[in-house]
Image (cartoon, helix red, strand yellow):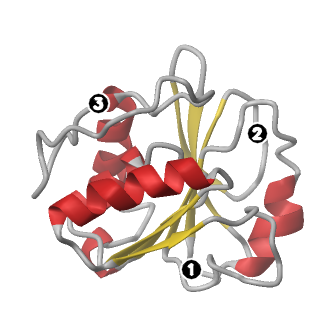
């Protein structure tokens, strides 16, 4: 998998093929960042944003955000081997505007998402999506853009925009205060 745009375009992101995760396809990553940049409904500026990749896996989304100019990226994954792979890649790039965490995404003792301007969620597909309202909405700042990639249908009034693909949908959500 390669970084598709920005400062690190073309760099190869190594993926551990033994892991049971599915990196976001290039086409979907491109769409996601085009929406962030060009859709006025979303009202965000990536260059001024703290971007959090809460279930980062290979780190491809967060790395793409860094490549495209995010002010800072927070990577989190419950699997330490995923965090170590992301760390190794970022050290090769010699960047410093990132943080790495190896936490359960629902850990309420350490809130790594509270300062995020953009929060990307790509949880395991068998996840109960009720966690959004129960564990995420009350922990982010009111203006945070939440982007969810899922194979499940979501029907929240807070959805600003959605883009469907063959077997998944990107949801762009802002919580209503």
Residue 157 spot, x, y in % from top left: 76, 54
Position of 16 with respect to 55 (left or right) is left
- The numbered mark, 3 or 1, whose residue comes first in the sequence reads 3
Secondary structure under badge 1?
Answer: loop
Depth order, front residue of 40/95: 95
Place residue 46 in its image quadrant.
bottom left
Place residue 25 in its image quadrant.
top left
Determine if residue 56 is in view. Answer: no
Give the residue drawn at x 29%, y 30%. Answer: 1
- The numbered mark, 2 or 3, whose residue comes first in the sequence reads 3
Query: What residue is pinned by disc 3?
Result: 1
Crowd class of label 3 (few under 14; some 14 to 19; many from 20; radius 10 Å): some
Give the residue drawn at x 59%, y 31%. Answer: 21
Depth order, front residue of 102/37: 102
Crowd class of label 1 (few under 14; some 14 to 19; many from 20; radius 10 Å): some
- The numbered mark, 2 or 1, whose residue comes first in the sequence reads 1
Q: Locate the C terminus and report the quarter of the image it occupies.
A: bottom right
Residue 101 spot, x, y in % from top left: 58, 70
Query: What residue is pinned by disc 1?
Result: 143
Position of 46 with respect to 129 (left or right) is left
Give the residue drawn at x 29%, y 52%. Answer: 64
Query: What residue is pinned by disc 2?
Result: 154
Give the residue drawn at x 71%, y 37%. Answer: 124
C-alpha span from label 2 to label 1: 20 Å
**Callout count:** 3
Secondary structure under badge 3?
Answer: loop
Front: mark 3 or 1: 3
C-alpha span from label 3 to label 1: 32 Å
Residue 123 spot, x, y in % from top left: 68, 44
């Amino acid at each position: 998998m390669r970084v598709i745009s920005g400062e690190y375009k073309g760099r190869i992101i190594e993926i551990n093929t033994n892991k049971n995760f599915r990196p976001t396809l290039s086409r979907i990553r491109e769409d996601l960042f085009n929406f962030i940049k060009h859709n006025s409904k979303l009202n965000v500026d990536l260059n001024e944003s703290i971007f959090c990749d809460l279930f980062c896996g290979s780190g491809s989304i967060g790395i793409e955000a860094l490549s495209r100019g995010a002010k800072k990226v927070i990577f989190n994954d419950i699997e330490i081997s995923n965090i170590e792979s992301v760390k190794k890649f970022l050290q090769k790039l010699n960047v410093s505007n990132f943080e790495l965490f190896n936490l359960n995404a629902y850990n309420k003792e350490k809130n790594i998402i509270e300062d995020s301007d953009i929060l990307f969620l790509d949880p395991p597909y068998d996840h109960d999506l009720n966690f959004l309202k129960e564990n995420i909405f009350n922990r982010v700042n009111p203006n945070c853009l939440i982007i969810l990639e899922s194979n499940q249908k979501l029907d929240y009034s807070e959805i600003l925009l959605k883009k469907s693909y063959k077997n998944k949908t990107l949801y762009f959500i802002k919580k209503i205060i």
